[in-house]
Amino acid sequence: MTVKDITHELNERIDDIQKKILSGDIKLLDFELVPLFDELKDSLTVQNLEKSSETYKNACILLNQKFDELRSMLSSLESEKQFLNYLNSNPSDLEIYALLNECWIELFTIDALSLDFLELSQNRLSIDRGDPIAIEHLRKGKIKNNFLLEIPKHKFTEKMMKFFNSIRTKLPCSLEDIFEDYTEQEVIYENFVYLLHLLQLGTLKYLKETNVIYL
């Protein structure tokens, strides 16, 4: 006798049940899961063992959810029963006042979001501020065709060689290692300019494949 493999159909039913639970269409406590497990048991074969195991796992998730809801409901009923027994014991007005007072949550306010602050903000925003300030764009001035940053050549060379001597003991090393001791962006940029000039002069060499600077 051939047993029909209905694991795919059962998985779709489980997914549909989960969606209806989330949407509030059904309550899991009112839903009977036994037929689902019976169908899974009857359709179990050696051939669909792996698929049936996954379906069984999904069905067990539903079952665990149902147990959780049941525990929650029983806990709620027990709390209601205890409160009802307490009221039937005829507690004094002072006891009831103390009980309710402990349940009351006092409101808190934040100055930055208080009603007074919001009203003050509204009043400030509604003030007539007049015409907006006109912004005039600056006119472009004429500059030389070839603009260069004018730095005395001897001073630039002196600083460049000072940078070269500071990194010489590290070589050969990666580009990142050269700048690892610098934290200020301006210093990094200035030293990077010196590095480019040293590469252009041939004082330093760069191996692109390994990202290494060497002499």
Image (cartoon, helix red, strand yellow):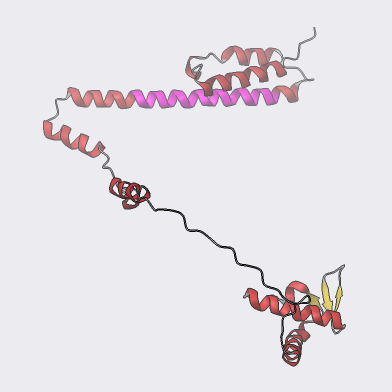
Q: Is residue 76 above or below residue 40?
A: below
Quarter location, residue 177: bottom right
Q: Residue at x 72, y 84 (%)?
A: 150
Residue 181 in sight from this viewpoint: no
Q: Is residue 20 above or below residue 170?
A: above
Q: Is residue 99 above or below residue 70?
A: below
Residue 114 rendering spot, x and y as whole percentages: 31, 47
Left or right: residue 210 versus residue 99 is right
- Magenta stretch, residue numbers: 53-77
Q: Residue at x 39, y 23 (%)?
A: 74
Left or right: residue 193 versus residue 117 is right
Screen quadrant of the N terminus: top right
| Nearer to the camera, 34 or 126 | 126
Residue 198 rendering spot, x and y as whole percentages: 81, 82
Q: Is residue 62 above or below residue 175?
A: above
Screen quadrant of the C terminus: bottom right
Q: Residue at x 48, y 18 (%)?
A: 29
| Nearer to the camera, 186 or 163 | 186
Is 54 a magenta residue? Answer: yes
Residue 4 rendering spot, x and y as whole percentages: 76, 11
Judged by its main secondary structure, the magenta piece is helix
Q: Residue at x 72, y 91 (%)?
A: 155
Quarter location, residue 203: bottom right
Is 200 a magenta residue? Answer: no
Residue 120 in sight from this viewpoint: yes
Left or right: residue 177 versus residue 126 is right
Residue 106 rendering spot, x and y as whole percentages: 26, 42
